[in-house]
Structure formats: structure tokens, C-alpha cells
Image (cartoon, helix red, strand yellow):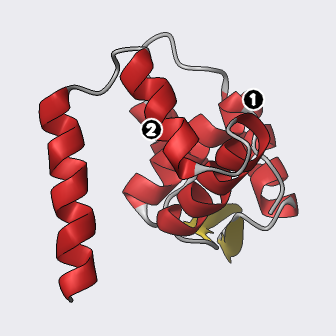
Amino acid sequence: MEKLTIQEEEVMIYIWELKSCFVKDIIAKFQPPAPPYTTVASIVKNLERKHYVTARRVGNTYEYSPAIKESEYKRAFMSGVVRNYFADSYKEMVSFFVRDQKISAGELKEIIDMIEKGKEE
């Protein structure tokens, strides 16, 4: 799975939200000032080339839909982050956020509860 640029990721998030959309629908999701139509259309074409979206011709335009699930992208992206920045250790990643005070003790307890509940199922 090819890594997305920041702009591609932002557009892809809108496509996941919309499920099926035209370029004008994506532009409407941006906060003003929205990028030009041609810029968004180019980004969507890149997403299609990278196999993140599929296009269906509708009249003289195209309707775009996600080709992969958001959860698939998150899983692949997070696996890469953990592998590249935390020595392939989720424990190291959580430790990093604990040391940096990005995760509170309460949140950590919730994570532990989720892990334990997952083992029971």
C-alpha cells in the first residue's frame, strides 16, 4: 500500500466520509478557502492511480468511491509507524505517549480493559 501525502490523506478522509462522491462534493467539505477544482481533481486522480479510489463515469464527469476501507489504511499506516519509529513494538509506542504525557492513567486503564475484554471474546 503506497503512502499518501498529507493532501491525499485529507481528500481520502472526505471520500471515506462521503462514501461515493464527485470532485465538487469533496471541495464542499473543505474549510474556506477551498483549494481549486483542478487541484482536488488532480489529487483524486493520484488516489485512483494508487488504487485508493475507483471511478465510475457519470455523464461528462466521474463519481469516486473508496477502493479500500479506512480501517485497512489505518492498520497499514500504524503498522509502518510502529515498525519505523518504535522498533516494531506497540509497547514502545504506548510508552512514548505515556512519557510525553499524551495518555493519562485513566486512558491507559481503558486500553488495558479493552485488551483484557478482547482476550475474553
Q: Which residue is mark 1?
A: 39
Q: Quadrant of residue 40?
A: top right
**Rendered view: 73 above or below 77:** below
Question: What residue appears at the point 87 percent right and 60 percent down from the top-left corner?
Answer: 49
- Expressed as whole percent of the image width and height from the top left, the position of residue 94 reads 45, 38
**Rendered view: 115 above or below 120:** above
Q: What secondary structure is marked by label 1?
A: helix
Q: Residue furthest bottom?
A: 121
**Rendered view: 105 above or below 120:** above
Question: What residue appears at the point 53 percent right and 19 percent down from the top-left corner?
Answer: 34
- Expressed as whole percent of the image width and height from the top left, the position of residue 117 reads 17, 73
Q: What secondary structure is marked by label 2?
A: helix
Q: Residue furthest left?
A: 106
Question: Which one is closest to the eye, mark 1 or mark 2?
Answer: 2
State the CA–CA distance, disc 1 to disc 2.
37 Å
Question: What residue appears at the point 19 percent right and 85 percent down from the top-left corner?
Answer: 120
**Given the image, on which type of amino acid does mark 1 rest?**
Thr
- Expressed as whole percent of the image width and height from the top left, the position of residue 108 reads 23, 40
**Given the image, on which type of amino acid does mark 2 rest?**
Val
- How would you rate the neighbour count of disc 2 (Cα within 10 Å): few for under 14, some for 14-19, many for 20 or more? some
**Rendered view: 52 above or below 27:** below
Q: Which residue is mark 2?
A: 94
